[in-house]
Image (cartoon, helix red, strand yellow):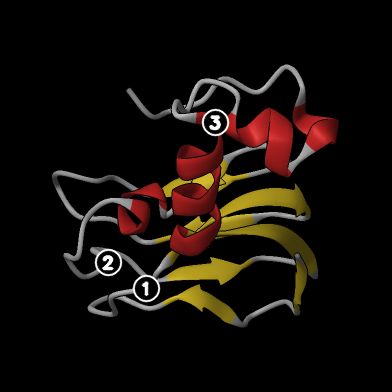
Amino acid sequence: DLLNVPAGAALVRKGECGMAAFIVASGMFEHSGDKQHPNQSYIKNDLVNVHCLYLTEPSRDTLVAAIDSAVWVITRREVVRHLRQYGHSDSLFKVLFPSFISFSCPFP
């Protein structure tokens, strides 16, 4: 699903345990980092919050839309359904999001 995020709104909040990752479809997101994770911006086709698909640890950062933005939502349920159906993850994003054919899957 495509989720619109208005400028200034938080997509992910520090300390929350989400069950979704996001691919930036448009706009830009920023977070204030720490010494381990410096400030970073995310733009179109960047994958964010992917650890929530396979870990239950809370987010280390708050991710805020710098301008009106949109993200593709990838839920843990979609990943599990894909793995059950196809038995591997190398084509996961090609199946879930056909427009991201050149996107490389971050899963082993």
Mark 1 or 3, closer to the camera: 3
With 54 as the anchor, is 91 left or right in this view?
right
Residue in the picture at 21% in, 70% down: 58
Where residue 64 appears, as percent x and y from the top left, is: 54, 71
Q: Which residue is mark 1?
A: 18
Please tell me whether mark 3 sits on a helix, a strand or a loop. helix
Mark 2 or 1, closer to the camera: 1
Q: Few, some or many C-alpha atoms within 10 Å of disc 2 (few <14, some 14-19, many ≥20)? A: some
Circles 2 and 1: CB atoms closer than 8 Å: yes
Specify the quadrant that holds the C terminus: top left
Which residue occupies the foreground of this view, 57 or 29?
A: 57
Q: Residue 72 is drawn in which quadrant?
A: bottom right
Q: Which residue is mark 3?
A: 86
Where residue 35 appears, as percent x and y from the top left, is: 14, 47
Residue type, numbered disc 3: Tyr
Residue type, numbered disc 1: Gly
Q: Few, some or many C-alpha atoms within 10 Å of disc 1 (few <14, some 14-19, many ≥20)? A: many
Please report whichever mark, 2 or 1, sits nearer to the chain's N-terminal start.
Answer: 1
Residue in the picture at 28% in, 75% down: 17
Specify the quadrant that holds the N terminus: bottom right
Q: Which residue is mark 2?
A: 59
